Image: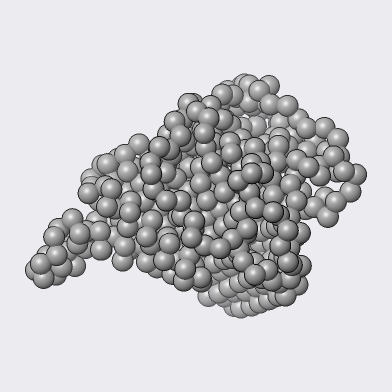
């Protein structure tokens, strides 16, 4: 079926601005991804999962200029002992990065080993992204698979002594990087992966995650700070028997950010928790789109997303839980809530349940409201200034999402960043 003319033109223009990397073990996956892009076309507002978010800024050939963040704030997780992998506008910075040797982990870069004939990542590169294209098309993820220039390839064979941190830095006002990461966690291993920073004026990242039986991956991500930038991120994960995947994203401002998370629980007794805390002010549009598929029995999934919006900011949540016929005893929960600090902001939500099994516990909740006047009165009556009282109630609202972070040090760092944002916005 031919694409509509406006969609075909946008696709042709976007592809004309890019060069497909050739050769090496990733070449077949890249060509297949390019074919998917050409078949699906770039997203537009008539696509079902893009009707709340205008995709033009993410698909135009040249990204809008975005000034780099000039604040003096400390980066989140700076005080956490971690192995640092640093990319500046999508280019690996060896001097700022640590030695990539860490016990229990093999870390390589896509740009360095892509020309090889064979590699362990060959079986994963583009595989989970391709599977995640059904039943919802995700052309920006396929575009990333085809054209990504670098990324971290992380193979966890045993539990390392410290987290692995992927740090993004934005210096060029016209940078348009694409990074593709792959994480494989072997049976019984456990790792924490941190992501932090703004990757470019317009940033594209795609992460494919394979967790074997009994493996555990804790993913904590901090976005924002650069108020002009735009980003489209994708996380695709498959979970084996008894495995765990927990992912939390904190977003502090930005211009346009869309985070898509696609998880399939393929093994019995697998567990996934996907959470996010977002605070936005002014010309800010933040979109969380989540799709979780239960394909095996006795699995648990939990989605908890909280957004604080003011001065015309827009928040979007699209979350779906799909329970396949064999996934009996599924326990799936979805919560999306917004706190509106004025009358100009918007929260747009589309929660979905599709259940094909009869012995499950599935639920979702979605609310949007203002500051609790009773709680505000209580704090004011005990001498708390109004601005501080609003901040305390805002932090209390976000707490349920932050509590999804198991590491107390990371959770405390996230709370500190949220408090700093509130202090600056008084």
**In the rendering, at what x and y percent does residue 247 appear?**
55, 61
Residue that sits furthest to the right in the current view: 117
Image coordinates for residue 19, horizontal then vertical, percent? 73, 27
Q: Residue at x 82, y 32 (%)?
A: 22
Q: State which quadrant residue 24 falls in.
A: top right
Q: In percent of the image, x 85 and y 51: which residue is there?
A: 119
Q: Is residue 312 left or right of residue 187?
A: left
The residue at 68%/21% (across/down) is: 16
Task: In the rendered view, tell whether residue 384 sits above or below residue 341.
Answer: below
User: Does residue 114 lie above or below 385 as drawn?
Assistant: above
Q: Which of 233 and 77 is in front in this view?
A: 77
Q: Nearer the viewer, residue 298 or 277?
A: 277
Q: Which residue occupies 32% across, 43% down?
A: 281
Residue in front for this viewpoint, 262 or 20: 20
Q: Is residue 228 left or right of residue 244?
A: left
The answer to whether residue 63 shows anywhere in this view is no
Would you say residue 11 is visible in this rendering?
yes
In what quadrant of the picture does the N terminus appear? top right
The percent position of residue 296, horizontal first and vertical second, equals 69, 71
């Amino acid at each position: 079926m031919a694409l509509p003319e406006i969609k075909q033109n946008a696709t042709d223009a976007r592809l004309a601005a890019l060069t497909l990397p050739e050769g090496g073990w990733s070449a077949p996956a890249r060509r297949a991804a390019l074919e998917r892009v050409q078949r699906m076309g770039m997203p537009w507002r008539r696509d079902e999962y893009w009707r709340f978010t205008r995709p033009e800024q993410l698909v135009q050939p040249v990204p809008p200029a975005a000034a780099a963040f000039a604040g003096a704030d400390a980066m989140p997780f700076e005080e956490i002992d971690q192995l640092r992998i640093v990319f500046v506008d999508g280019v690996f910075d060896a001097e700022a990065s640590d030695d990539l040797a860490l016990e229990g982990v093999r870390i390589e870069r896509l740009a360095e080993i892509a020309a090889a004939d064979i590699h362990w990542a060959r079986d994963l590169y583009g595989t989970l992204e391709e599977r995640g294209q059904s039943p919802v098309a995700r052309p920006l993820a396929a575009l990333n698979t085809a054209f990504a220039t670098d990324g971290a390839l992380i193979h966890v064979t045993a539990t390392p002594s410290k987290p692995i941190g992927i740090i993004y830095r934005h210096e060029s006002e016209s940078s348009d990087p694409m990074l593709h990461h792959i994480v494989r966690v072997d049976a019984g291993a456990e790792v924490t992966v941190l992501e932090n920073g703004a990757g470019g004026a317009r940033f594209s990242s795609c992460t494919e995650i394979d967790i074997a039986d009994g493996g555990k991956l804790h993913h904590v991500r901090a976005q924002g700070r650069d108020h002009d930038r735009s980003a489209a991120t994708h996380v695709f994960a498959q979970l084996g028997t008894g495995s765990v995947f927990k992912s939390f994203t904190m977003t502090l401002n930005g211009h346009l950010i869309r985070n898509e998370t696609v998880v399939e629980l393929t093994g019995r007794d697998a567990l996934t928790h996907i959470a996010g805390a977002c605070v936005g002010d002014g010309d800010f549009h933040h979109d969380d789109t989540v799709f979780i598929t239960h394909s095996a029995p006795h699995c648990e999934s939990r989605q908890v997303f909280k957004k604080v919006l003011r001065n015309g900011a827009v928040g979007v949540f699209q979350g779906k839980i799909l329970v396949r016929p064999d996934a009996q005893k599924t326990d799936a929960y979805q919560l999306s809530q917004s706190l509106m600090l004025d009358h100009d902001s918007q929260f747009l939500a589309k929660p979905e349940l599709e259940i094909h099994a009869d012995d499950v516990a599935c639920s979702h909740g979605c609310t949007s409201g203002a500051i609790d006047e009773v709680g505000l009165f209580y704090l004011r009556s005990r001498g708390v200034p109004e601005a501080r009282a609003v901040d305390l109630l805002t932090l209390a609202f976000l707490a349920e999402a932050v509590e999804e972070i198991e590491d107390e040090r990371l959770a405390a760092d996230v709370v500190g960043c949220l408090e700093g944002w509130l202090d600056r916005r008084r």
